[in-house]
Image (cartoon, helix red, strand yellow):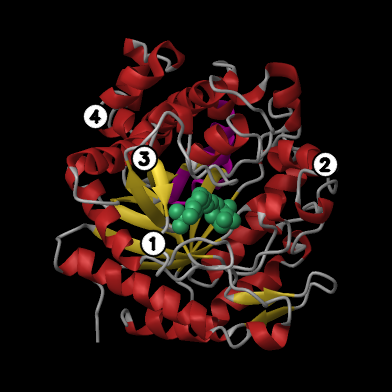
Amino acid sequence: MKTFPQNFTWGAATAAHQIEGAWQEDGRGPCIWDAFTHIPGKSHRNQTADVACDHYHRVEEDVALMKAMGLKAYRFSFSWSRLMPQGRGAVNEAGVAFYNRLIDALVANNITPWVTLYHWDLPLALQLELDGLVNPEIADHFVRYAELCFERFGDRVKHWITFNEPWCSAVLGHGIGYFAPGRVSQTEPYLAAHNLIRAHGKIVDVYRRKFQPAQKGVIGITNNCDWREPKTDSPADRAAAERGLEFFLGWFADPIYRGDYPDCMRERVGERLPRFSDADRALVLNSSDFFGLNFYGGMLAAEPAGETVATIVPTGNGGMAADQRVELSDDPAWEKTDMDWNVVPDFCRKMLGWIDRRYGHPPIYITENGAALHGEDDVAVAVNDTRRIDFINRYLAACHAAINEDGVDLRGYFVWTLMDNFEWALGYSKRFGLHHVDFATGKRTPKQSAAWYAGVMRRNGL
Ligand code: GBH
């Protein structure tokens, strides 16, 4: 038996846009993902999240699923444009009522709510009127929206995550155009990232000054990073791997824990990389009560042999490849998920160790980890998801080793995801859920992994 620390947080995660549906109901305003997926060619079979899991109409049923598996913590996000349809100004009270229902149901069932303020669904009005994330003004709009959330929900929500994976908003949304708002640029990713980091600092400052003393919650940010393993032992490949990690995670975590972007980014990105004003730097530095990490995989990293960098996978795995110049590859022996992502639990342990050393032993929560599996459209196949059990089991064993052998302060783990949902540009073609969802009828069916994970939570261990 591998036992986890007392009070270890066991959870599952979702995001508003991926599950709620009801995209035009009860006053919800449009977001950039509505606009993006309604453009033919932007998503798998032009699928949209208009209905998704119809969670908006099935809140009680979905909380019952959580209850049935003994879930301790549920991470979900608020749809900004459901709460503030234009992104600023008027509040939509029907949206507030919806999240009140959800939060009250969670609390009544002893499930701790973990709320992400922003999981990629910017109100469309702010994109059209202000150019969204590339406009420095966006930070103040984020702050006003966050204040609304703290005011209305902070009496019951004690765990806040400002942003989910700003790397994705920057690189996938503004670098390669694979995600909304579909921008393609070598400059905008750095602007978008900078404004998200600034906004994070400002939101946390407001929370700490105006809300935390009375509400006594914690607030942090969730970043994603895929591990970079040196392809060979050569100093050049080792430096390439380190550079890959600095461009991926250091980009977002260094300003918060060390006060500025990594030196290698300043050297290589030059003037396209914005500078923090003294005032912004002061707000950003030490602005996270915990380190949120979404971990899904990793690749081998090498110093590129020639002028061009060979490997840029379509999902932008190479990041701003021309700037970092790290050649990525897979070990052919690696098992892969249906996303083509590598199953590399050891790399999770290495990633946790890297964060622990670089950022001074912060409390870490894995706010997402999970696998999409092939063939799960068919519910009969999906319910026998022994491969998912094996995947989570191996990642949790790696987490256990990180805690017990490496001394990492890992405090929680959230499976992505509670139920199959709208997988962004890949539509409904990829299934990560502990529960199967029949998207024609909305019917939920627990997979074997849900029962297995229930046991892990109950025993607090493997
Ligand atoms: C997350 O993003 C999102 O937060 C969530 O909304 C989404 O549904 C979920 O993941 C599943 O996609 O090729 O082995 O190196 C994940 C961001 C970036 C993680 C690319 C995996 C490639 C892994 N991903 N990365 S690998």
In this rendering, does residue 29 appear at all?
Answer: no
Relative height, residue 284 to residue 448 (above, below): above
Quadrant for the N terminus in the image: bottom left
Q: What element carries label 3?
A: helix
Q: Disc number at residue 249?
A: 3
Instruction: Characterize the local packing of mark 3: few (<14), some (14-19) or many (20 or more) Cα atoms within 10 angstroms.
Output: many
The residue labelled by disc 1 is 331
Is 291 colored magenta in this rendering? no
Q: Disc number at residue 258?
A: 4
Mark 3 Cβ and ligand 1 under 8 Å apart: no
Q: What residue type is labelled 2?
A: Gly
| Disc with the residue nearer the chain's start (4 vs 2) | 2
Q: What element carries label 1?
A: loop
The picture places residue 398, in percent across and down from the top left corner, at 28, 69
Mark 1 Cβ and ligand 1 under 8 Å apart: no
- Alpha carbon separation for disc pair 2 and 3: 37 Å
| Disc with the residue nearer the chain's start (3 vs 4) | 3
| Disc with the residue nearer the chain's start (1 vs 2) | 2
Instruction: Characterize the local packing of mark 1: few (<14), some (14-19) or many (20 or more) Cα atoms within 10 angstroms.
Output: few
Frontmost of labels 4 and 1 is 1
The picture places residue 421, in percent across and down from the top left corner, at 68, 63
Residue 420 found in image quarter: bottom right
Residue under the image location 35 percent in, 39 percent down: 244
In this rendering, does residue 329 appear at all?
Answer: yes
What residue range appears in magenta?
A: 144-161
Q: What residue type is labelled 3?
A: Leu
Frontmost of labels 3 and 1 is 1
Query: Do residues under tags 3 and 4 come within 8 Å of each other at their CB atoms?
Result: no
- Alpha carbon separation for disc pair 4 and 2: 42 Å
Q: Which amino acid does label 4 sit on?
A: Arg
The residue labelled by disc 2 is 27
Q: What element carries label 2?
A: loop
